[in-house]
Image (tube, rainbow, N blue to C red):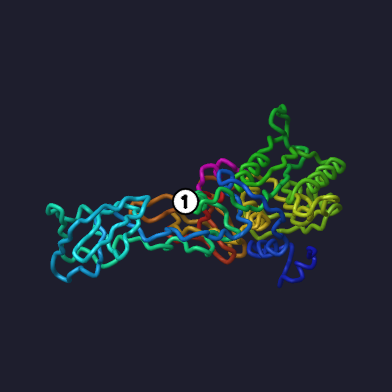
Amino acid sequence: MKSIAQIAAELQGYDPQALGADDVNEFLSRLVEPVGGVEEVGIFDALGRVLARDVISPFSVPPHDNSAMDGYAFDGAQLPADAPLTLAVVGTALAGKAWQGTVAAGECVKIMTGAIMPAGLDTVVPQEFTQAEGERIRIPPKLLQRGDNRRLSGEDLMAGQPALRQGERLTPAALGLLASLGLATVPVARRLRVAYFSTGDEILSLGEAPREGAVYDSNRYTVFGLLTRLGCDIVDLGVVRDDPARLEAAFTQAAQQADAIITSGGVSVGEADYTRAMMKKLGDVAFWRIAMRPGRPMAVGRLPAAAGRDPGEAGSAGAILFGLPGNPVAVMVTFLAFVRPALLRMMGARAETPPLLRARSSTGIRKKPGRTEYQRGTVSTAADGSLQVGITGNQGSGVLSSMVQANGLIVLHHGQGSVAAGDLVDVMMFDGVI
């Protein structure tokens, strides 16, 4: 396991006082490792979990060639180039069992959607495209090609091949795929356990009476929502006052119980509290000033492993620490930009950068090159059908209401300058990450 100093030495031009957003994610990709532990869960409990092993298809899907339509199955070799085809109907093939008869030249079988294709037949004409003539049907010319409307055996999945890959987060479609293979349970990585708390004497918990200079804690509830959407097992340690003994107890408890720890507040240079000092005392921690807005100050590191834990149990390999800024929007932005990808890696999920949407900015946005900016925005459809995005009100890092109004973050990259109205910009959509 590499130390903070060893990882920093591997990164070209590493400067903790001037890191770019990409530098932070590169650092974190080297710091965090997937946690151990696998459990078998039922399909109803598997949504959002990370697949621990490849799922191999026990049979081909579909297991037989079958009809994609209600219609008539026949040998497509009989289709003439420019003339109609007349066929005698000699039976009916129903879904759920194979038709046992034989079909000669000039004959066809009425067939239902999903029914097994009778031997020697490879084409289906939809019923509505035929003309009935007693016990015969007439197929107009130039309507079909050989093989039309037939689903091939194994065209979805082949027996013995991976149906789902290790590291996939299981979606509703994946649950249906597992069920189609007759699998009632699935091996998944154990849930990542994350402990979190807010710091500061000025923070009020819900239920406390207002007092001058104090603010109610919103960060715990935002972080709770973000971690819940991610599928983590959550340990809420509340608000911890600026007191060395209480901070040490909170960090120690968190490290004993969790794979990762998230704090908010207390990481800025010169703050009148003990959080930075306690992080340094208890673990291997780096303090960063990131070239970004909002969310410049951040701490990251590792607290020692809890003694006596079984391998794979929460806290057995030490806890990764994420010290986030105190402002509410900065907490959300740094979580989405850095913490979420790192936690997914710890969960064993495949490292995939969420795709950014391209939309035209409805207004000009001032920006200086040399830092990454995340502007709260709302994406909508313009009159011409194209996507447009506009910023949502006050962009201050403490203005949470504009985050509520937004449906994504406009990502203005490190080397990018000011944006003119009509320019294309990248947007990180909240749907799928929050």
* Highlighted range, magenta: 397-407
**How far across and down, in percent of the image, does residue 141 sit?**
16, 65
Viewport quadrant of the N terminus: bottom right
Q: Which residue is mark 1?
A: 390
Q: Dividing the picture into quarters, in which one does residue 165 lie?
A: bottom right
Q: Is residue 146 left or right of residue 328?
A: left
> 393 and 355: which one is in front?
355
The correct choice, above or below, for 218 with respect to 312 in the image is: above
* Number of numbered discs on residues: 1
Q: Is residue 105 left or right of residue 265?
A: left
**How far across and down, in percent of the image, does residue 95 sit?**
35, 50
Q: Is residue 409 left or right of residue 330?
A: left
Q: Residue at 30% across / 53% down in the picture?
A: 93
Q: Residue at 29% across / 64% down in the picture?
A: 121
- Which residue type does callout 1 highlight? Gly
Q: Residue furthest front?
A: 101
Q: Is residue 391 visible?
A: no
Characterize the local packing of mark 1: few (<14), some (14-19) or many (20 or more) Cα atoms within 10 angstroms. many
> 307 and 296: which one is in front?
307
**How far across and down, in percent of the image, does residue 156 sit?**
44, 60
Q: Residue at 69% across / 61% down in the picture?
A: 28
Q: Dividing the picture into quarters, in which one does residue 65 lie?
A: bottom left
Q: Is residue 334 left or right of residue 237?
A: left
> 189 and 107: which one is in front?
107
**How far across and down, in percent of the image, does residue 53 sit?**
62, 59
Q: Is residue 321 visible?
A: yes
